[in-house]
Each structure stands twice: as C-alpha cells, then as structure tokens.
Image (spheres, rainbow, N blue to C red):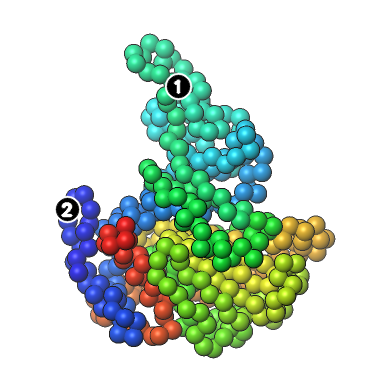
C-alpha cells in the first residue's frame, strides 16, 4: 500500500498490508514508518495540526495574565489566563513579521513584540501598532494573533491548531466518562520531568502500551508487581485505549508513601489503570496519584517526553511532601531510563537494511490498535 504524501503529489512506497490483518495474523511495520520525513510530515498535517492536544494544567496559570509558551513541532503557541478568568490560546507569531511575542512562562498585562513593539492583549487582540497610521487600509481592530481552540477537562488544558476543530465535548466524552472517578481536577501538578529521546515519537507511544515488555525491561522497578497475563483489551479509534490491571504504587517496594487518594479509598493497593488519548497523551492511575505523559515529536528521529506527577491538593501541605515526592520522581526517572536504550535501539533497528518486521504477539493488541488508528488517519481512511 502506498501512502499519499499530500500536496506535492509524491508517493511513499510502504507496505502496510501485513499490519492491517487481524492481530493473530498481523506483523509489525517496516522501519521506514519510523524514519521517513514524508510520513512525519503527514503525521504533522493529519494528526498534530488537526487533533486536540494536552498542553498543560490549569494550575500552571492560576492568575489573570499568567501564561506559558509551547511548541507543537514547528508551530509556536501561547496559553494564557485572560482578564475574565478564562483560558485563551493563540499563535505566538506577531502579525507584522512573525516574531514571537512571548517567551517561556510568566505574567503580563500585554504581549509586546520585541521587534516593532506591536502590542496584544491577553486574548491575542492587537492593542497598538506604532507608526502604522499612514498605512492605507490597515485596521488594527481586525488584526489579532490567530486564535486556537481551547478545551478544558479535569484541570487539563487542551489546544487544537485546526482551522475548524472537532467539538471538544465529542473528543473528550468517552475518556472523561471512563476516568471521571480519578478526579484529576482535585489533583495538582507536583513535578514535571522532561526526557529528550533519540527515537521516533510513535516508538514512545507504542512502548507505553506494550504489555509484552513490562516484566522484562522493568524487572528492577515495577515489573515484578505487574499482572503476568494480558490485562486489558483495547480498541481502535479516537476514543483511545483504556484498561485496568493489578500493579503497585510507583515507588521502590510498591507501597504507597501517602495512602490512597480519598476518592479511591475503596480501591486495593494494587489498583492501576491506563488511558491513551490520541495522538500523544497517556494517563496512568494508581491508588495514590496520577501520572500523565505528553509525547512531542521534534523530528522523525527525536522526541521530547514530558512526564507529570499529580497528587491530591491536600498533600502539598504536608511537611514531608517534598521529601517523599523525591522518591516518586526518582522512580519515574528509573523507569524511563530503563526504556531509553530499548527505544533508541528500536530506532537504530528501523534503519537496518536487514530488519524484517516480525509477527505480532497477542499481547501487543495495544500497539496493534494504536498503529492501525494512526494509519487510518494518515491514509485518510478516518481523517
């Protein structure tokens, strides 16, 4: 099967037929799926420029004027708390010459372009444009930083770069219904850890859904506490992957340092759940906290993983909170570092002329479904 490379009319010769078979007959994809700049461009156009993307938490911008900047592949954006208390998002590209009007994180009343001093308000509307009075037909009232779609759920902020985004309520409906009991809105961001990974972004997504490797690659961390059998079933579609299984708190020894979250008081210490929200968000629930990962493509060969640790708000007041948080943080670093060499090796293998894609295990249904969903989208079968 040849994938349509888009507007330039070129074709990508990639045989994806074997992964489209039923799982018991399927095999993995050729390495080019993870190395091709053309496929990467299709993913940018048909996934990341169209879908809803989780970019952060509401508590990161609690006050009017708080903002942070983000980059989605080549697109620069700003997320801010406006004067009415709502969340706004817009392109970080001055409408004069394209210079960024904000950097990093902070608080401001206005966004000032550092090149020619064009000024924008907290909703991205142009306020002043110096020395433009004599420019015929220029109306500052019609000029603004391009607005982006914003969706909020559970304290998470989602942004869409699409010209006409799909309704956020439809996008989040099943995921929100499934995981409302975790009450993410009653948690706060305790820690963000950033990992720079030398592999294609899809390898990171697949690895997080790979049941097959957990008890092998993570034998020194959480692998010994995981179910030894296939613990969740997955489906293919925008709703993502959801499942429940037995594991342990994500600390050495597997015993929570804080006890259950109040709203999970009836859950056993071994409670665990997982939710993948396409294209790049992964949520992990335990009895005592939540982890969410955001996987950001940089190039076909490089990915940034933002790992976030969330705890109930009331725990932040405990005098021992920061010390115990260090234990959770160190454990997460250990887990990702256990994976780092493996996913880097996957990338090297994708370049090998000797690599022939192997058959899939029935334990790889999560990987199978996420690959096929992505193919549906980039081939236009479910665009």
Instruction: Identify the residue shown where x is 43% and y is 36%.
Output: 146
- Which mark, by number, is residue 141? 1
Instruction: Identify the residue shown where x is 59% and y is 35%.
Output: 82
In percent of width and height, residue 214 lies at 52, 81
In percent of width and height, residue 345 lies at 40, 75
Q: Name which quarter of the figure residue 10 lies in.
A: bottom left
Task: Using the rendered image of the protein, determine whether residue 161 is visible from the camera's viewpoint.
Answer: yes
Most distant residue in the right direction:
319
Mark 1 or mark 2, earlier in chain? 2
Q: Is residue 207 above or below residue 159?
A: below
In percent of width and height, residue 286 lies at 64, 72
Residue 249 in the figure: left or right of residue 284? right
Task: Using the rendered image of the protein, determine whether residue 196 is visible from the camera's viewpoint.
Answer: no
Q: Given contact means CB atoms under 8 Å apart, are the residues at marks 1 and 2 in contact?
A: no
Instruction: Identify the residue shown where x is 37% and y is 56%.
Output: 47
Residue topped by disc 2: 9
Q: Nearer the viewer, residue 195 or 47?
A: 47
Q: Is residue 128 above or below residue 27?
A: above
Most distant residue in the bottom direction:
228
Query: Within 10 angstroms of label 1, few (less than 14), some, or many (20 or more) residues?
Result: few
Residue 93 in the figure: left or right of residue 381? right
């Amino acid at each position: 099967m040849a994938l349509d490379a888009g507007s330039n009319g070129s074709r990508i010769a990639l045989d994806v037929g074997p992964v489209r078979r039923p799982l018991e007959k399927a095999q993995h994809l050729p390495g080019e799926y993870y190395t091709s700049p053309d496929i990467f461009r299709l993913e940018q156009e048909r996934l990341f420029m169209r879908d809803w993307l989780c970019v952060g938490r509401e508590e990161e911008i609690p006050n009017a004027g708080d903002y942070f900047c983000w980059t989605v592949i080549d697109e620069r954006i700003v997320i801010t708390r406006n004067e009415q208390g709502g969340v706004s998002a817009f392109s970080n590209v001055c409408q004069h010459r394209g210079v960024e009007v904000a950097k990093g994180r902070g608080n401001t009343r206005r966004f000032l372009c550092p090149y020619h001093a064009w000024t924008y308000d907290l909703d991205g509307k142009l306020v002043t444009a110096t020395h433009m009075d004599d420019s015929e037909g220029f109306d500052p009232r019609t000029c603004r930083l391009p607005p982006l779609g914003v969706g909020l759920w559970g304290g998470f902020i989602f942004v869409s770069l699409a010209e006409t985004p799909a309704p956020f309520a439809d996008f989040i409906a099943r995921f929100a219904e499934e995981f409302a009991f975790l009450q993410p809105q009653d948690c706060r961001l305790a820690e963000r850890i950033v990992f720079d990974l030398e592999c294609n972004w899809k390898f990171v997504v697949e690895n997080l859904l790979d049941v097959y490797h957990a008890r092998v690659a993570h034998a020194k961390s959480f692998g010994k506490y995981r179910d030894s059998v296939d613990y969740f079933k997955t489906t293919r579609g925008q709703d993502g992957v959801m499942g429940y299984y037995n594991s342990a708190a994500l600390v050495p020894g597997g015993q929570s340092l804080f006890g259950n979250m109040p709203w999970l008081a009836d859950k056993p210490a071994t409670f665990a759940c997982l939710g993948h929200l396409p294209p790049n968000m992964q949520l992990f629930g335990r009895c005592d906290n939540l982890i969410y990962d955001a996987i950001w493509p940089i190039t076909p060969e490089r990915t940034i993983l933002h790992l976030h640790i969330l705890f109930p708000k009331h725990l932040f007041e405990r005098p021992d909170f920061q010390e115990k948080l260090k234990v959770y943080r160190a454990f997460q670093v250990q887990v990702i570092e256990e994976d780092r060499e493996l996913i880097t090796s996957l990338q090297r293998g994708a370049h090998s002329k000797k690599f022939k894609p192997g058959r899939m295990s029935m334990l790889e249904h999560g990987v199978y479904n996420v690959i096929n969903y992505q193919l549906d989208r980039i081939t236009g079968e479910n665009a």
